[in-house]
Image (cartoon, helix red, strand yellow):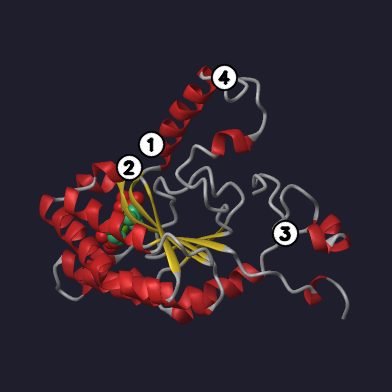
């Protein structure tokens, strides 16, 4: 058979994950919520390795939202301690695997010791370029847009950008994700089917995959399931399916992605 089914669709270059369900995982087992986060951190390690093994160059993990400060103090403190522990333990592995660490979100508002641990890990991996792990911490897409709008307005005031620009790249270079390509696939675990303020601008043309699996139970096999679902999607970017069938070589390029 000749046709669409013979065209090998590329795997995503960039996956974003909303790692949800740690609390419910713990509750189901009669454990405390922090215990659920600890198990979630193990899944995070597994998925970072799995992404590299599967050739996914960019992975962005939603680890702590700006809204998560509203949780009980004890849980927030446990999450910040876990972040520090994770960075202390994982930096060596990231260096060994040549993975560059990035952070998005209002990092300057994190507790000092967590911020320092993060900056140290970012510094230790800054030379690498093949693999990119981004942690979204104290992240809110709307805050990011506000911060970008402010920086954009200042650049216009300095005469560096025309106020008449129609180029998305002129604006998106002020987003926290300026160095990253747009995500191709966004995964959310735990059965919730919302975005919770994650990468709203960047996911304009992303594919979404929702699974009932709770984050601590999400493993390489689950990731492969998400990838196989992704491969069955047709990313049309406004075109028709017939157009894609005749010009399969141009089918997968995102017209909203500023060229590097
Ligand atoms: C995700 O798991 C981790 C963070 C948001 C930090 P949750 O803690 O939200 O787990 P549920 O949604 O309560 O099960
Ligand atoms: C989103 O999860 C944030 C992270 C995964 C870090 P939440 O569990 O906080 O999201 P909501 O509040 O249920 O939407
Ligand atoms: Mg949750």
Residue under label 3: 252
Neighbour tally class for label 4: few under 14, some 14-19, many 20 plus, Cα within 10 Å: few
Residue under label 4: 159
The secondary element bearing badge 3 is classed as loop
Q: Name the image quarter holding the N terminus.
A: bottom right
Residue sitting at 24 percent across and 61 percent down? Answer: 83
Disc 2 to disc 4, how far (Cα)?
27 Å
Neighbour tally class for label 1: few under 14, some 14-19, many 20 plus, Cα within 10 Å: some
Query: Does label 1 or label 4 sit earlier along the sequence?
Result: 1
Horizontal side of residue 58 vs 109, given as left or right: right
Residue 143 has which mark?
A: 1
Residue under label 2: 106
The secondary element bearing badge 1 is classed as helix
Quarter of the image for residue 22 reads bottom left
Residue 122 drawn at (x, y percent)? 36, 58
Q: Is residue 92 visible?
A: yes
- Foreground mark, 2 or 4? 4
């Amino acid at each position: 058979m000749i046709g669409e089914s013979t065209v090998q669709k590329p795997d995503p270059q960039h996956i974003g994950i909303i790692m949800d369900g740690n609390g419910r995982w713990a509750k189901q087992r009669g454990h405390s919520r922090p215990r659920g986060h600890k198990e979630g951190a193990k899944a995070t390690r597994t998925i970072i390795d799995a992404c590299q093994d599967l050739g996914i160059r960019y992975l962005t993990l939603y680890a702590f939202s700006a809204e998560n400060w509203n949780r009980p103090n004890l849980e927030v403190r446990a999450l910040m301690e876990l972040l520090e522990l994770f960075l202390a333990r994982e930096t060596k592995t990231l260096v060994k695997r040549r993975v560059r660490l990035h952070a998005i979100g209002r990092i300057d508002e994190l507790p000092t010791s967590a911020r320092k641990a993060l900056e140290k890990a970012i510094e230790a991996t800054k030379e690498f370029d093949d693999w990119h792990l981004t942690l979204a911490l104290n992240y809110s897409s709307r805050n990011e847009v506000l911060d970008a709008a402010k920086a954009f307005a200042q650049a216009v005031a300095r005469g560096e950008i025309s106020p008449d620009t129609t180029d998305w790249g002129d604006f998106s270079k002020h987003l926290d994700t300026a160095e990253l390509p747009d995500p191709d696939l966004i995964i959310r675990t735990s059965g919730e089917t919302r975005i919770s303020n994650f990468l709203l601008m960047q996911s304009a043309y992303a594919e979404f995959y929702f699974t009932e699996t709770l984050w601590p139970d999400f493993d390489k096999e689950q990731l492969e399931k998400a990838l196989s679902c992704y491969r069955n999607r047709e990313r049309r970017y406004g075109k028709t399916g017939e157009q894609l069938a005749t010009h399969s070589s141009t089918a997968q390029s995102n017209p909203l992605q500023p060229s590097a």
